[in-house]
Image (cartoon, helix red, strand yellow):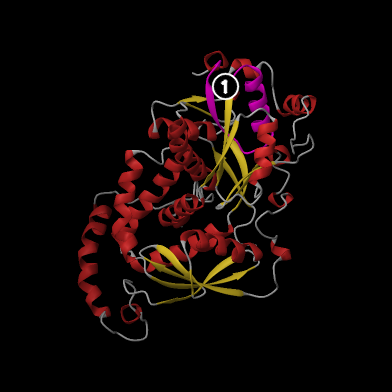
Amino acid sequence: MTTLADLKGQTVAFAASGGLDSCTVTKWLSEHGVNVVAFTADIAQPDETDFSEIERRMRLSGASDYIAIPLHDMIAESGIEVIQFQARYEGDYWNTTGIGRHVIVAGMIPEMAKRGIKVLGHGATGRGNDQVRFQLCTNMLDPTVSIYAPWRDEAFLSRFRGRTEMIDYCETHKLPIKASRSAPYSTDANLLGLTHEAGQLEHLNVGPWFVTPGMGVKPEQAPDKVEEVTVKFENGRPVAINGKAVSAFQAIQTANDIGGRNAVGICSHLVENRFVGIKSRGVYESPGMELLGTAFKYLLQLVLDRRSRELYDAISPFVSKQIYQGYGFDLATHMAREAIKPVLKLVNGTIALKLYKGGVTFAAANDVPNQMYSESNASMEDIGEFNHADSEGFLRVLQVSARALAANGQVTPPRWAKQ
């Protein structure tokens, strides 16, 4: 483990958001003879658009240099991949912060190499998931880079026990922080969504709508009419929204706007299992991911047969966990990427959705060349290509094993089936 004693006279590339932790750690390290270079990943975070202001705060906190890394395309592409895997952790969370940490590290490592910096610092706490993501992603992309995590350093912990001491310290040194002691919760943001946690949200009698949405509106504030939106996919990628061609970044940005104004994917509540072994509560906003992810889901329903569906449904939660736990760059995740490539070639077509006060429903599917669905075969009105009588032989085969189970005492009906 890298400690303050190991850093004297060295340079640390600190992943800086410009918030309370960034300012506190940068100033504290600088006071102890450590050269801090602040790196901020531009991942289209909606709560921080003025990077010159972040630079000002970091330099006033003691950073010797400041680098903003443009990662709009990388965060967008990572979001599209999350959609393609339908990688929602524990069924509800689109992994927006989890994949965001992968992007930050992937953006920082090459920039650090250019400058010969071999220590990456971050402000993630010792009880959360982000410390794991920063650690594992860095270890995988460049094993020669070491990690400095102040919240695991006894020297730092002996000085700062929590938020109050940090605010006091910053005020004493007249650092330009925005944090306040009365903040009701904390927020982490990028193009894909917002994560709200801690503060008042740690109390389960406080509902998710306690949060003030940052990417849209609450359902009661959404328009009183249905908005219809079409999303066209080619090879598993959204290429047009409402008939207008879009890049990956534009697709998510446009979907954020459309979904947000209709309260889609706003303030989703989840009490989840953190990788470190504790329960935590998050309130999530991801309007664009919810909109595009739902459209993708409907196309999957049309193109996957039963066996490929079963395999896909096994891969999806696995990759979701991989991203959540910081393993998005490992062999297993790469194998999963290769496994769904044949699926993505088939995800072509246009899905129309209806949006209304937070709800997303199917409206229509058009131009889906690889769909398995056949109106003729599925029809209850006409025999078509599927002759109902042909099922007689199919069921004669199935009844052999069913009767064998009964004959050998292997059938135990539940209580509700007994009279």
- Residue 181 point in image, percent of width and height: 78, 34
Against 226, residue 104 (above or below) is above
Against 217, residue 43 (above or below) is above
SS at badge 1:
helix
Identity of the residue drawn at 66% across and 40% down: 54
Identity of the residue drawn at 33% across and 77% down: 374
Q: Nearer the viewer, residue 93 or 349?
A: 349
Say which residue label 1 marks. Answer: 152
Compared across the picture, whether 23 is left or right of 98 comes to right
Against 306, residue 52 (above or below) is above
Is 367 inside the magenta-drawn segment?
no
Against 156, residue 91 (above or below) is below
**Can residue 259 be seen from the camera position used here?**
yes
| Magenta stretch bounds | 8-34
- Residue 16 point in image, percent of width and height: 60, 35
- Residue 140 point in image, percent of width and height: 38, 33
Is 18 inside the magenta-drawn segment?
yes
**Tag 1: residue type?**
Arg
Q: Nearer the viewer, residue 138 or 302?
A: 138
Which residue is most to the bottom? 382
Q: Quadrant of residue 417?
A: bottom left
**Can residue 126 be seen from the camera position used here?**
no
Q: How many marks?
A: 1
Q: Nearer the viewer, residue 34 or 313?
A: 34
Which residue is most to the top? 5
- Residue 127 point in image, percent of width and height: 58, 29
Compared across the picture, whether 405 is left or right of 163 comes to left
Mark 1 burial class by Cα count in 10 Å: few <14, some 14-19, many 20+: some
Q: Quadrant of residue 35?
A: top right
Identity of the residue drawn at 49% across and 33% down: 134
Compared across the picture, whether 304 is left or right of 390 comes to right
